[in-house]
Image (spheres, helix red, strand yellow):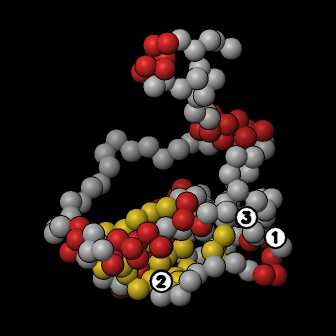
């Protein structure tokens, strides 16, 4: 392991071993190891559609879109630190009320359980922060519902089926901008 230098400390550099996890390469390798004939391909577009806000954010109604799943007590351990739990997956877009205190979990997702426990719901379901932003006037309003979208889809199914359904539901709520949290 390389020794830290005085310059490293002055510049605020991280230790040489403190590098980002190469998760994209890991996913490609994982798909190949599962026997798929080709590695996972991330969606990468030559042009990304962007629509500027029509009014300031403090006048804009904001929605929340998440990949977290509603807690299902009959589907095994789904608590913080739970092992990967495929039985907790969901297969259709769902809508939840923001007025409630939704019980959503992420045991159905593949994430690094060594360094992340999912104990802080705010990391994958920032409803409390959005409510605070609305109460402080930083956003115009928070939509009455949040949207949950499945993670078990092909890119084609996500684009052709799930995205239009989420968009339809956001528009029904009068949402003008959305925070999307893919845990």
Q: Residue at x 75, y 46 (%)?
A: 114
As helix, strand or loop, the secondary structure at mark 3 comes to loop
Label 2 Cα crowd, 10 Å radius (few <14 / some 14-19 / many 20+): some
Residue, x 21% and y 64% (percent of image)? Answer: 53
The quarter of the displayed image where residue 69 is located: bottom right
Left-right relation of 41 to 34: left
- Which dot, 1 or 3, sits closer to the camera? 3
Task: Decide which of tag 2 and tag 3 comes sooner along the chain.
Answer: 3
Residue 163 in the image: x percent, y percent?
45, 68
**Residue at the spot of label 3:** 80
Which one is earlier in the sequence, the residue at label 1 or at label 2? Answer: 1
Sort mark 1 into few (<14), some (14-19) or many (20+) by Cα contacts within 10 Å.
Answer: some
The residue wearing badge 2 is: 98
Tell me which corner region of the image, top left, top right, bottom left or bottom right, holds residue 68. Answer: bottom right
Residue shown at the point (39%, 44%) measured from the top left: 45
Where residue 77 sits in the image (x, y, percent)? 81, 70
Determine whether 43 is above or below 178 in the image.
above
| Label 2 residue SS | loop
Q: Check disc 1 and report the residue beneath it.
A: 77
Q: Quadrant of residue 138?
A: bottom left
Q: Determine the CA span between mark 1 and mark 2.
A: 24 Å
């Amino acid at each position: 392991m390389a020794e830290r230098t005085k310059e490293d400390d002055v510049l605020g550099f991280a230790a040489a071993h403190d590098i980002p996890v190469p998760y994209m390469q890991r996913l490609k390798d994982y798909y190949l190891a599962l026997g798929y004939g080709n590695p996972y391909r991330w969606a990468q577009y030559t042009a990304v559609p962007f629509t500027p806000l029509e009014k300031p954010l403090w006048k804009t109604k904001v929605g929340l879109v998440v990949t977290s799943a509603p807690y299902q007590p009959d589907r095994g351990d789904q608590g913080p630190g739970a092992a990967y739990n495929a039985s907790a997956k969901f297969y259709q877009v769902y809508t939840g009320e923001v007025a409630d205190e939704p019980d959503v979990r992420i045991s159905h997702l593949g994430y690094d359980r060594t360094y992340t426990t999912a104990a802080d719901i705010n990391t994958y379901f920032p409803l409390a922060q959005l409510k605070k932003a609305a109460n402080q006037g930083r956003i115009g309003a928070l939509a009455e519902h949040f949207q949950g979208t499945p993670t078990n889809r092909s890119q084609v199914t996500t684009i052709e089926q799930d995205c239009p359904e989420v968009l339809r539901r956001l528009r029904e709520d009068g949402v003008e901008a959305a925070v999307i949290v893919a845990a």
